[in-house]
Structures are given as structure tokens and as C-alpha cells.
Amino acid sequence: MEGDLAHIGAGLAAIGSGAAAIGVGNVAGNFLAGALRNPSAAGAQTATLFIGIAFAEALGIFAFLVSLLLMFAV
Amino acid sequence: MEGDLAHIGAGLAAIGSGAAAIGVGNVAGNFLAGALRNPSAAGAQTATLFIGIAFAEALGIFAFLVSLLLMFAV
Amino acid sequence: MEGDLAHIGAGLAAIGSGAAAIGVGNVAGNFLAGALRNPSAAGAQTATLFIGIAFAEALGIFAFLVSLLLMFAV
Amino acid sequence: MEGDLAHIGAGLAAIGSGAAAIGVGNVAGNFLAGALRNPSAAGAQTATLFIGIAFAEALGIFAFLVSLLLMFAV
Amino acid sequence: MEGDLAHIGAGLAAIGSGAAAIGVGNVAGNFLAGALRNPSAAGAQTATLFIGIAFAEALGIFAFLVSLLLMFAV
């Protein structure tokens, strides 16, 4: 058995990256459901869509960052 | 087999960071669903949107903080 | 292989911190969905919103506290 | 490798503490959704809200208690 | 017992890749539900559909990238 325990940690962190996609999908999915019911209001909420995606995506990118740090920096 | 057990802990903590994105997505998704149904009320609830995102995001950033502490401070 | 087993425990506890964000997101998301359907009643339920967030957030902060205790106090 | 296996158990118990927050969020979220649809009935259900939160919160606090016992009493 | 610990990490990272598919499915599923209710508005939201899929897919591809790095580059 060889290898570095940090590589197991990097794999675990990548699960967090994938889990954040559920949150991003929730934001974009609800926007699409609402925009197709009331298309005239969709333009005014585009800013909120990107704010919501950004906050959820940030947490996933933090997890990806931990994964990269564990593979190459620690 | 080499490496530090704290690196496995850092990877586990990053899963928590990703899981918090599901909560953030829930807040932003429900705001978008409601704002597209009743756009005239969206402005008055923007403050609540950011309060909800902040409380959910804080728990994800706590998990990311644990991850950083385990990699660099412990 | 080096390191302290408590560091694996700290990482596991941080998953609990992130999972609590799903509960916080559920409270805030349902408040926003309801407040945008019936904005005139939103003011009267703001206290309930913060009570719900506080109880869910408390459990996430307990998990974060366990994480800090495992890293620095045990 | 040093440390006590009980510290891994304490971390696992903290996941249970966070998972209980999902239940608390479910109770408070559904109360808010209903109270904003029918505000005049919300006052009569406040007692039920706190009963529901208390039962869900209790299970999370039991998990937090297990975590504390594993760290300091066992 | 032989083998490299990085291979366990690569398998764990692939879980993250799969979890991201839940988010992507949420986006595309909500688009289809809305587009079939109101087909005339579907064309205007196609751009939002691809934006939502791209953000969720990116997090899954990050997890796949971690998996490939753990197998071939680390």
C-alpha cells in the first residue's frame, strides 16, 4: 500500500464540489420554471439569478480549491 | 503510506462546504419562483433574500474554514 | 502516516455544519415563497422567520463547535 | 498515528447534530408557508410550531451531547 | 495489500461527478416542465437553460478533473 493520505482527502473534497451543483441546479431550475410561467417578468430577475448562482457556485469552488490544495500544495 | 491524517479531515470538511450550497440554492430558488409569480413584491423581499443567503452561506464558510485550518494551522 | 485521529473527527463534524445549512435554507426559502405570494402578511411573520433560522443555525454552530474543540481543545 | 478513536466518533455524532437541523427547517418552513397563506390562523398554531421544533431540536441536541460525552467523559 | 491510496480518492471524486448530475437534471427538468406548459415562451429561455446547465455541469467536471488528476498526474 503506497500513496499519500492527502489524495483520499482530495477525492472527498471533490464530492463537496459535486454536491454544490445541486444548489446551483435548484436556483436555475426555479428561475426557468417561473420564467416559463411568466416570461414578461424574467428580464427583471436575471440579476437575482446570477447572484443566487454565484453564492452557490462559490461554495462548490471552495471545495474544488481544497481538492487542488490537497493534491499540489500540501 | 505517508501523509497526515489532517488532510483526510480537510477533504471531509469540504463536503460540508458543498452541502451548504444546497441550502443557499433553496433560498435563492424559492425567491426566484416567488418573484416571477409576483414581480411587484420582489423589491420588498430583497433584504430577506440576502439575510437567508447570509445565514446559510455562513455555515458553509465555517466548514471551509475548518478545512483551511486543518491544512495549514493544525 | 502521521497526524492525530481527532483531525479526522474535526472534518466529519464540519459536514454536520454544512448539513445544517439545508435546514436554514428550508426556513428562509419557505418564508420567501410565502411572503412573495402574500406580501402584506410578511411583516407579522418576520419574528417566526428569525426563530426558525436561529433554531436550525444553532445545531450547525454546535457541529462547528465540536469541530473547533476537536482541533484545539482535545 | 496518535489520538483516540473516540474523537472520530465525536465527529460522526456532530453530523447527526447537523442532520437534525434539516428536520427543524422542515417544521419552521412549513409553518411559515401556511401562516403566510392564512395569517389569521397563524396565532393558534404557534404552540404547535414550538412543539415541532422542540422534538426535532431535541434529537440534534442528543447527538451534540453524544459528541461532548465522547470528547470529555469517555 | 497493494495499490495506491490515490485510487480510492479517484473513486470518491467520481461520486461528486455523479452528484452534480442531480443539479443538471434539476435545471433541464424544470425547463421541460415549463416549456411543455407554455411552449411559445420556450425559445426565449433557451439561453438561460444553457447558462444554468453550464454552471452546474462545471462543478461536476471539476470533480471528474480531480478524479483524472488523482489517477494520472499525482
Image (cartoon, coloured by chain):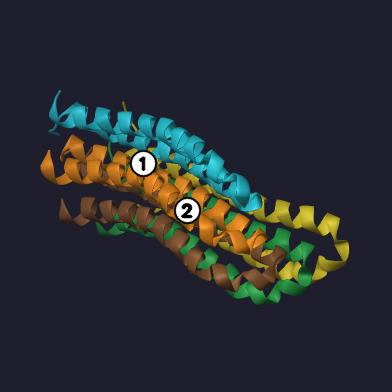
Chain colours: A green, B brown, C orange, D cyan, E yellow
**Residue holding disc 1:** C16
Q: Say if D60 sits above or below B54 in the image.
A: above
User: Which residue is drawn at the image coordinates 36% and 31% (left, top)?
Assistant: D58
Image-quadrant location for residue D59: top left
Q: Residue B43: x and y, percent?
A: 58, 73
Q: Say if D66 sits above or below E47 in the image.
A: above
Residue type, numbered disc 1: Gly
Quarter the N terminus of chain C occupies: top left
User: Which residue is drawn at the image coordinates 57% and 51% (left, top)?
Assistant: C30
Q: Residue B47: x and y, percent?
A: 49, 69
Q: Residue E1: x and y, percent?
A: 31, 25
Q: Say if B8 sits above or below D58 in the image.
A: below
| Residue E68 visible to an observer of this rendering | no
Which chain does tag 1 point to?
Answer: C
Image-quadrant location for residue B51: bottom left
Q: Secondary structure at mark 1?
A: helix
Which chain does tag 2 point to?
Answer: C
**Residue holding disc 2:** C49
